């Protein structure tokens, strides 16, 4: 799995890219929390639940069904989040589902039970470039932990930043077009070009 530091990269990129009107601060914060919720299943290790069990790590909590449940809870509390129910549902579903999708890109551990409860099969992506993070905290403060963070910068944070930047660019593009069309200087230049073209046609006709 990527570290808990990197899972919020996806909802943060979506929130910053879509803007505060679409994703208010409370919804953005809820998305960041939702993105790390699936890893609460590590508590199962303390109770002797095997890694490969449905209740084990990367099991039911890493399914799309669990992500939909988080989104549904968000839709119920949409007033507190300051958005419409469908917006809360979609954003929190995406934030939660991004967790197992990123885990499926790691090079270690077991796959993720994306289709639980319909299937207990564990899935990995065809390409797995992200170094898996150690579960033990002690191993994180080691050369291995440093390598994991560098891997996440390259394969999680950089693509997320690109996504957020692209969304922000597309979001602001209509505003820039509207501003340029309403600019008196642009309008005057356009009118002059129109007059010049019309005069040329009149001279040619004469």
Image (cartoon, helix red, strand yellow):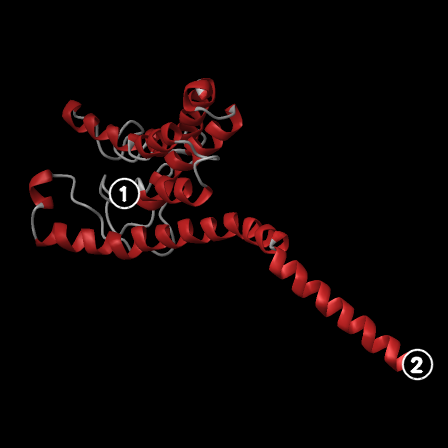
Residue at left offset 25%, top offset 29%? 41
Near-viewer residue (22 or 57): 22
* Residue 52 seen from this side: yes
Picture coordinates of residue 151, whole percent (x, y): 23, 55
Give coordinates of residue 68: x percent, y percent.
Answer: 45, 28
Q: Is residue 94 above or below residue 105?
A: above
* Residue occupied by mark 1: 110
**Local crowd size for mark 2, using a 10 Å CA cut-off: few (<14), some (14–19), many (≥20):** few
Residue nearest the viewer, comparing 193 with 111: 193
**Residue 139 position within the rendered picture, expressed as x and y whole percent measured from the top left:** 8, 44
Q: Look at the numbered disc 1 and give the secondary structure of its residue.
A: loop
Q: Quadrant of residue 15?
A: top left
Residue occupying the far right of the picture: 206
Please identify the quadrant where the N terminus is shown: top left
In the picture, measured across the screen, residue 197 lies left or right of residue 103, that is right
Identify whether 102 is placed above or below 58: below
- Residue at image position (33%, 31%) is 29
**Residue 2 position (above or below residue 49):** below
Circle 1: is it few (<14), some (14-19), or many (20+) Cα within 10 Å?
some
Q: Which residue is mark 2?
A: 206
Q: Quarter-wise, where is residue 44 in the image? A: top left
Horizontal and vertical percent position of residue 177: 59, 54
């Amino acid at each position: 799995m990527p570290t808990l530091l990197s899972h919020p990269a996806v909802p943060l990129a979506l929130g910053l890219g879509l803007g505060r009107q679409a994703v208010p601060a409370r919804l953005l914060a809820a998305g960041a929390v939702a993105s790390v919720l699936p890893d609460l299943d590590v508590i199962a290790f303390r109770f002797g639940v095997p890694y490969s069990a449905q209740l084990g790590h990367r099991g039911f909590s890493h399914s799309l069904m669990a992500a939909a449940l988080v989104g549904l809870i968000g839709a119920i509390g949409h007033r507190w989040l300051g958005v419409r129910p469908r917006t809360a549902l979609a954003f929190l579903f995406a934030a939660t589902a991004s967790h197992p999708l990123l885990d499926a890109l790691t090079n270690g551990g077991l796959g993720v039970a994306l289709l639980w409860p319909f299937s207990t099969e564990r899935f990995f992506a065809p390409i797995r470039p992200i170094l898996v993070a150690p579960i033990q905290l002690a191993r994180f403060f080691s050369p291995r932990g440093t390598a994991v963070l560098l891997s996440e910068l390259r394969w999680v944070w950089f693509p997320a930043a690109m996504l957020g930047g692209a969304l922000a660019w597309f979001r602001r593009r209509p505003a820039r077009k509207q501003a340029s069309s309403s600019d008196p200087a642009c309008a005057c230049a356009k009118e002059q070009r129109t007059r010049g073209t019309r005069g040329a046609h009149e001279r040619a006709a004469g």
